[in-house]
Image: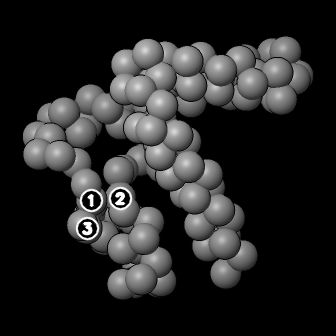
């Protein structure tokens, strides 16, 4: 996942196009600059790499996922409130489901 894309637009408009070809089509970036998007993508990738490393070192993917999820949920709740946090987590689950469905084809 090297770029921020709208998977709903990806799925609805072009089942066979690559994420690069979509180029953030209809993505809700709230007016973020390309530099901001790149910074967020780099941060996201670094955190995911660190979590994958922790999973490999400790050989306990469930514990790492729970720890990361707990940190994320509690921090987001403090920063954004319950509704925004729940909506974000739901969107993450939907994204995982869509990615899983796309991997089948």
Q: Nearer the viewer, residue 35 or 76?
A: 76
**Mark 2 Cα within 10 Å, few/some/many (few <14, many 20+)?**
some
Q: Quarter of the image containing the C terminus?
A: bottom right
In whole angstroms, how far apart are the C-alphas of marks 3 and 2?
6 Å
Name the residue: 25% across, 67% down: 25
**Mark 3 Cα within 10 Å, few/some/many (few <14, many 20+)?**
some
Q: Quadrant of residue 52?
A: top right
Position above or below: 5 against 73: below
| SS class, disc 2 | loop
Question: On the image, numbered disc 2 is attached to which residue?
Answer: 5
Name the residue: 37% across, 62% down: 6
Position above or below: 20 against 1: below
Q: Are marks 1 and 2 in contact (CB under 8 Å)?
A: yes
**Mark 1 Cα within 10 Å, few/some/many (few <14, many 20+)?**
some
Position above or below: 95 against 60: below
Name the residue: 87% across, 23% down: 60
Residue 27's disc number: 1
| SS class, disc 1 | loop
Position above or below: 9 against 70: below
Q: Nearer the viewer, residue 105 or 86?
A: 86
Q: Are marks 3 and 1 in contact (CB under 8 Å)?
A: yes
Rendering coords of residue 54 (x, y %): 72, 17
| SS class, disc 3 | loop
Q: Are marks 3 and 2 in contact (CB under 8 Å)?
A: yes
Q: Quadrant of residue 26?
A: bottom left
Name the residue: 27% across, 29% down: 39
Residue 25's disc number: 3
Q: Is residue 19 left or right of residue 65?
A: left
In whole angstroms, how far apart are the C-alphas of marks 3 and 1?
5 Å
């Amino acid at each position: 996942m090297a770029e921020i894309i709208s998977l709903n637009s990806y799925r609805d408009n072009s089942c066979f196009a690559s994420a690069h070809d979509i180029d953030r089509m209809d993505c809700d970036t709230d007016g973020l600059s390309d530099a901001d998007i790149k910074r967020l993508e780099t941060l996201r990738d670094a955190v995911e790499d660190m979590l994958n490393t922790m999973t490999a070192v400790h050989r306990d993917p469930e514990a790492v996922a729970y720890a990361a999820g707990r940190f994320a949920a509690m921090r987001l709740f403090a920063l954004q409130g319950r509704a925004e946090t729940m909506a974000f987590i739901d969107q993450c689950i939907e994204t995982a489901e869509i990615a899983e469905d796309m991997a089948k084809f």
